[in-house]
């Protein structure tokens, strides 16, 4: 099997006004990573998105056979992606060996370009430092989405040490959650001026031509459900406050609680799962399963109130930047959230509840006002100013500022 780039895949010569580097992103498996880095291609950067997963994940997701063959796919004039399916734990247990096929693919792609420019590497997990050591790019960007020490608890300290090294050695470190940016600025003070807080962007396609003070017409699946439609979009997991979800359903028995997202695997031995089962057993709680991004936009726009009912003491929630914040705001609809650190940054745009009683009262206040909290225009403007395309442009500007001595 050959992975060589064909002549038809070659990119046109770069223009003089384009950024003077080519970029490999390792990796872009999460949708928000792809949404952040893909627009760079429209700004003149030639981008290769690496998407890696282990074979267990590939089997569970029923990946097509072509994904197992590590194909190189052309998505645009300056945009490519390459899939990798590797043994479980391969890149973390044997990183120097596991990174070699990815480094080989990155070099092959870079050599295929017409007039290759200096190569920059963006890494989204600290263990990709080993890829940097093999690939030896001209510049390094670290993009953080979570506290990865919670992913691999048995290696918590080694992960944190590796992350501090990634921040120290990167030209720019970008954190989607402000609390994480602050933590690493404190942990690596010598890199403080190279750390950037950059929240997730809003989907341009979801932003209407004007603020939406009233909910849109609902999709067919919920068209016959009684209002108010109180909606949550996200994975149905232990991070949600399922007692609070139940409280919402009971407080609005004549309304409908809509849950959109992948359902959890059975976990009867865990207390949260019993609370989840209790919540979804209520007659006005409706699970719709997974939906595409385009479908999600329509549901968000139809909700009377968009909900973020996360547990505030869950370690993942404390350091998270929920993508649903900007997804919701793109539709202008009212939002009620528990008091997560990142959500507190938007308390001028939507309701932040410190308790379950305040959460319910905030929903009631919005519903009683005709599902209009008076802040639709503010959310609409912030969403317009914070699209993924504009967020990507801000990232590029910061990266160029910090690499102007090495990247033309």
Image (tube, helix red, strand yellow):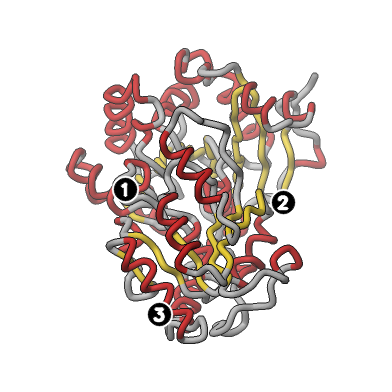
The vertical placement of 201 against 113, above or below, is below
| Front in this rendered view, residue 346 or 232 | 232
- Nearer to us of marks 2 and 1 is 1
| Residue pointed to by mark 3 | 365
| Front in this rendered view, residue 312 or 392 | 312
Q: Position of residue 294 (x, y in %)?
A: 69, 61
Based on the displayed image, in which of its 4 quarters is residue 346 positioned? bottom left
How far separated are the C-alphas under marks 3 and 1?
27 Å
| Residue pointed to by mark 1 | 318
Residue 352 seen from this side: yes
Q: Position of residue 211 (x, y in %)?
A: 54, 83
Point out the image quarter for the N terminus: top right
How far separated are the C-alphas under marks 3 and 2?
47 Å
Q: Residue at x 55, y 63 (%)?
A: 231
Based on the displayed image, in which of its 4 quarters is residue 264 positioned? top right
Are discs 3 and 1 less than 8 Å apart at CB?
no
Q: Residue at x 56, y 25 (%)?
A: 103
Q: Residue at x 73, y 63 (%)?
A: 221
- Which of marks 1 and 2 precedes in the sequence? 2
Neighbour class for label 1 at 10 Å: few (<14), some, many (≥20)?
many
| Front in this rendered view, residue 329 or 387 | 329
- Nearer to us of marks 3 and 2 is 3
């Amino acid at each position: 099997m050959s992975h060589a780039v064909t002549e038809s895949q070659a990119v046109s010569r770069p223009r003089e006004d384009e950024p003077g580097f080519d970029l490999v992103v390792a990796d872009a498996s999460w949708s928000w990573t792809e949404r952040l880095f893909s627009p760079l291609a429209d700004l003149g950067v030639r981008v290769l998105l690496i998407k890696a997963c282990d074979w267990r994940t590939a089997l569970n997701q029923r990946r097509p056979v072509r994904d197992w063959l590590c194909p190189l796919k052309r998505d645009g004039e300056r945009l490519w992606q390459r899939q990798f399916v590797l043994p479980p734990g391969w890149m973390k247990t044997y990183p120097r060996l596991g990174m070699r096929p990815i480094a080989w693919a990155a070099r092959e792609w870079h050599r295929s370009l017409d007039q290759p420019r200096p190569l920059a590497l963006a890494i989204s997990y600290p263990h990709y430092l080993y890829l940097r050591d093999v690939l030896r790019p001209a510049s390094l960007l670290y993009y953080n989405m979570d506290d990865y020490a919670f992913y691999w608890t048995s290696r918590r300290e080694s992960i944190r040490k590796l992350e501090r090294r990634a921040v120290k050695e990167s030209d720019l470190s970008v954190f989607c959650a402000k609390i994480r940016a602050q933590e690493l600025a404190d942990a690596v003070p010598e890199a403080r001026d190279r750390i950037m807080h950059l929240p997730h962007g809003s989907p341009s396609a979801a932003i209407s031509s004007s603020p939406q003070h009233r909910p849109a017409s609902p999709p067919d699946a919920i068209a016959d459900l009684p209002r108010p439609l109180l909606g949550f979009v996200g994975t149905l997991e232990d991070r949600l406050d399922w007692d609070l979800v139940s409280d919402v359903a009971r407080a609005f028995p004549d309304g409908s609680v809509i849950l959109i997202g992948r359902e959890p695997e059975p976990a009867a031995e865990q207390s949260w799962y019993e609370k989840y089962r209790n919540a979804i057993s209520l007659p006005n709680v409706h699970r719709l399963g997974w939906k595409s991004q385009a479908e999600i936009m329509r549901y968000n726009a139809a909700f009377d109130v968009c909900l973020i009912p996360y547990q505030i003491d869950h370690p993942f929630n404390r350091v998270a930047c929920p993508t649903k914040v900007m997804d919701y705001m793109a539709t202008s609809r009212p939002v009620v959230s528990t008091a997560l650190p990142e959500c507190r940054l938007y308390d001028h745009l939507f309701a932040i509840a410190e308790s379950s009683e305040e959460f319910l009262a905030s929903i009631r206040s919005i519903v009683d006002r005709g599902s209009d909290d008076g802040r639709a225009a503010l959310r609409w403007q912030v969403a317009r100013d914070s699209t993924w395309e504009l967020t990507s442009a801000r990232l590029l500007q910061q990266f160029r500022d910090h690499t102007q001595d090495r990247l033309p």
